[in-house]
Each structure stands twice: as C-alpha cells, then as structure tokens.
Image (spheres, rainbow, N blue to C red):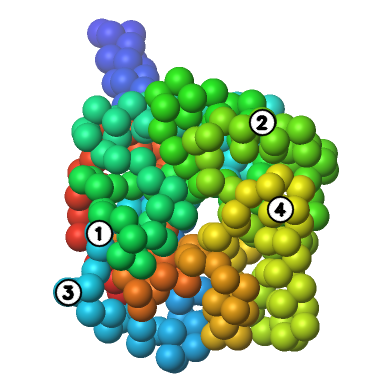
Amino acid sequence: MHKQLLYGALTGIGFLALFLVCIFVVEHYKDEQTKITTPVLETNKTMVKKLPDAIKKQLKYASPSATLRVPILMYHYVENIQNPKDRLRVELNVPPAIFEQQVITLKNAGYTFMTAKELGEVLDGKMALPPKPILLTFDDGHWDFETDVLPILEKYHVKATSYIISGFIGGSDFMTSQELQEVVNSGLVDVGAHTVDHLSLAGLSLKTVEYQVDQSKVWLEKNYHINVVSFAYPNGSFDQQAIQVVKADRFSTAVSTVPGIAQNQSNRFFLYRLRPGYRTGPTLLTWLSQNYFTAY
C-alpha cells in the first residue's frame, strides 16, 4: 500500500515536472518567435524623439491627401549565419530561405516591386504609381547581397535598391568592386549612396557631412557609370543639416529608419521604412495591410 502511494506520488511529481518543462519550452519558443518576427522599433522610437522639432512636425502632420502608401522594407544581412554569437548580425539578419518566401509571398499577392529611383519619379509626377507598390532596400553593401540576395532577385525577376558604403567596397565583410559591378549589370538593382565611411550624420560639422554625402555619390557614379539618386542615412541618423546637404547633392530621395508606410513630399528626404523580420505568407500580408500613416 505504502509502495503504491509512494509510486503514485512520484508519478504525480514526474508529470508535474514534465508539465512545467513543457510550459517553459513553449514560453521560450514564444519569446524567440517574438524576437525574430517583431521589427526592431525601440531604436527607431528613440531616434524619432531625438529629431529636431521641425522634422517631428513633418512626421506628424504630413497631409494625408498627398500621401502615397508605399511600404519600403529594410534589410541588412541576408545569409545563413555561421557565428551565433555575433549578436548584431543575428538581430539584423533574415536568412535567404525566409527572404525568398517573402518575395514569393509579395509576388503572389500582386505587389509591384519598385526602386527608390522610381519612387522619386512618382513623387516628381514623372511616373504613375503602380498597383500595390513595394520597395526592397538593403543597407551597407555586404557580400551576401551578391551571393544570396541577387540570385533570388534574378530568379523571380524583382527589383531592389542597394545602399553602398563607398569606402567599404572590397572590405572583408563587403562586396568587392567586381561583385558590385555584377549587381549593377543585373539591371534589377538601383544602387544608392550610404556615405563614404558609414558615419552617423546628425550633429557632425557641415564639412564632414558634405564630404560623406557628396563623395559617396561621386565615387559610385564615376566608377560604375550609373546615376545615383537615392541616399540612406547610416544608423538612421540625420538632422536638418543632413537633409539640406542631401538635397543640394541632387538626390531625389533619402531613406530613414523611421517606422512607417506613408511617403510624400514632406518626407521624401527621410522616407519611412519597415523591418519585415521573419514574417512570410499571411502574416506578412496582414502586417503590411495595417495603416502605418505616420511614425506616431
């Protein structure tokens, strides 16, 4: 009798322990899913708070009547990461298989892939906005753009914009000059400028900002015989001075990391972007259908 009671008690404890372990595993899985499917917005929110009041007013009060609903997706790394301890890379990465599923999802849903150059032409009234427009943008010019992203773009024949740090070309983590030439030759990629040295531009001297913005454009245009008309602010850092320099350098658009989906004349030099994370299929489409008309 005592043995049966003891056995029953131990069995009950075992089931309870197993139950608690299951709960832990499920909650941990949910936490991990949240990490990989939720866009990194806290940095963006902090950045928005630090913007000059004049720019924040533009963010908040841009006229809805002049607004184009154009999601611009932002990527950095698209690769199968070999070192899981590289936390920054892990946080900014979307594996190639996931990226391909995102392209398939968008293509099957009837989205039209545009470049930043084409969006500038739409804002200028030189081109009609296509049905269900969307932009794929990639910052920095890492080597995986040529090895992992470009084959997917070519496979599904979709356009993208790649923002290049001109001074980093040929670096250990970046495309070589020849690889970038192959990207240009594809005819699917609009190359944009991302400064010479990837410096955060807000608060820098006018001379430094002018050099970083102007020389990145000049170098890319001279060496690849292309017209560079879009700019991306490194680390999403910009102020009114940076905007004025970008305008003066004859860029037609510039992208920020401010979260949003509405693009217009008021924010054409700090266009909103979104991080898609690991979203694919209906989850991605539902997320994009949400009404992100301002950053607030």
Q: Which mark is residue 220?
A: 4
Where disc 3 sits, the SS reads helix
Residue type marked 4: Leu
Q: Which residue is mark 1?
A: 69
Q: Which residue is mark 2?
A: 182
Say left or right for 120 vs 2: right
Give the foreground label among 4 and 3: 4
Marks 2 and 1, how far apart in space?
32 Å
Q: Which mark is residue 65?
A: 3
Residue at horizontal 77%, vertical 83%? 207
- Give residue 181's quadrant in the image: top right
Task: Using the image as rendered, state which of residue 6 and residue 272 is in the foreground.
Answer: 272
Residue type marked 1: Arg
Q: Earlier in the sequence, mark 2 or mark 1?
A: 1
Say left or right for 148 vs 15: right
Say left or right for 64 vs 80: left
Marks 2 and 3, how far apart in space?
41 Å
Residue type marked 3: Ser
